[in-house]
Image (spheres, rainbow, N blue to C red):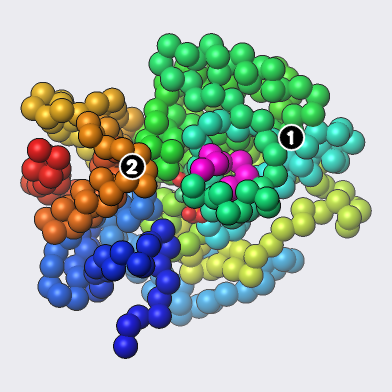
Amino acid sequence: MTSPVWHPFTQHGLQEPIPLVERGEGAFLYTADGRRIIDAISSWWVTTHGHAHPRIMAAIREQTEKLDQVIFAGWTHEPAETLALGLRAIMPDALTRVFFSDSGSTSVEVALKMALGYWMARDEARDRIIVMEHSYHGDTIGTMSVGERGVFNRAYEPLLFDVTRVPFPAAGCEQATFDALEAACDSRAAAFIVEPLVLGAGGMMMYPPEVLAGMRAICAKAGVLFIADEVMTGWGRTGTLLACEQAGVVPDILCLSKGLTGGAMPLAVTMASEPVFEAHYSTDRSKMFFHSSSYTANPIACAAAVANLAIWHDEPVMERVTALAAAQQRHLDRLAATHDIRNVRRCGTIAAFDCAGGEGYLSDFAPRLLARFREAGVLLRPLGDTVYVMPPYCIDTPTLDEVWSVIADAIA
Ligand SMILES: *Cc1c(COP(=O)(O)O)cnc(C)c1O
């Protein structure tokens, strides 16, 4: 019988092979038909330290002996408490509150709801969200609304709410972004949501820390809440724990997910500043924050995240990140010298370039490349014409060399 599974972002009509993965270890995945695949995109940007990190796996096993799940409205548990304190210790001081959810999308939905709740509590009619062109914040109705519109969400357009867009700060055009943001920060503006330094799904588009700092300053001056969606950029990807750090930026609201559990379990947090929390703080039940999902702060996922924090504390994660970033740059330079590639760019461990000859997101260019990579035993998933490499930090030199040599062969 054919599989009844309906896969995400998959056109089943094309009958492309869907490998069955049995096991993961470090930078490798192992398929049922005995192949070893290099996971060069960290399983869609979640796996930071490598697959099945022993400490995270042990923490999950231990937690399953104690508590699987408990309602989080009005109840709490040790893994969530420990994790929240751990996050407070390493995240910016001003982010005093930790709200749990279970995916990047929900962490963004929560951030948007917190922002609207903040203004409602202050009796100010601010309900407009400002966003950046080409952004991606998730696939739920709310997060699609604040993301780039296109073929991905055309059918759902009637459900999406209206936002104000500022242009992407392309090199040389930063002032246009600042001007548009300043104009957008009017008396109706509630919040600006942005992916710091790297727009991931938008095509690994990068902009420098000074621009992030400039945008933050404009919002601060206008009193508009600044939401940093670090779902992809967080946990070392851009060379620092948070991308915001490089700009000296502290957001009012911060979204974290993907690397929060090292990529092992679904979990997210939305961290908020004290004023955002205080706006919901009252003896009046009608002013509480109205959001929950069944698995909010699932204890097993929280235990995995506590283990992730311990790894960041005990292992030389930042050294790995720095070494990987340098190696990525060497590979980019070498490829650019020998192949016809464009817009070569890197931010921390994320390396990207555009292929000459690609023709947009839905052309068969990316799927053809993807198939070549898959045959060569490397998991890469180009975004339209953009090829990027974003491996787990544990990847060793020969394995990374293999990834780039497969890329060089495929695009030749
Ligand atoms: C992946 C991503 C999301 C959505 O996270 P999910 O866990 O897939 O819901 C949101 N924002 C950014 C920047 C992302 O990269």
Q: Residue 80 occupies which quadrant of the picture? A: bottom right
Q: Nearer the viewer, residue 59 or 159?
A: 159
Residue pointed to by mark 1: 128
Q: Residue 116 occupies which quadrant of the picture? A: top right
Question: Would you place residue 10 above or below residue 23 in this image?
Answer: above
What percent of the width, then of the height, locates residue 350?
A: 30, 37
Question: Would you place residue 144 above or below residue 214 in this image?
Answer: below
Residue 50 appears left or right of 197: left
Q: Nearer the viewer, residue 264 or 205?
A: 205
Q: Residue at x 56, y 30 (%)?
A: 132
Does any portion of residue 270 appear in the rendered image?
Answer: no
Label ID, residue 384: 2
Mark 1: amino acid: Arg
Q: Nearer the viewer, residue 409 or 326?
A: 409
Q: What is the magenta range? A: 142-150
Mark 2: amino acid: Gly
Residue 229 appears left or right of 377: right
Secondary element type, mark 1 = strand
Q: Earlier in the sequence, mark 1 or mark 2?
A: 1
Q: Residue at x 79, y 29 (%)?
A: 188
Q: Nearer the viewer, mark 1 or mark 2?
A: 2
Task: Tell me if residue 149 is in the magenta stretch.
Answer: yes
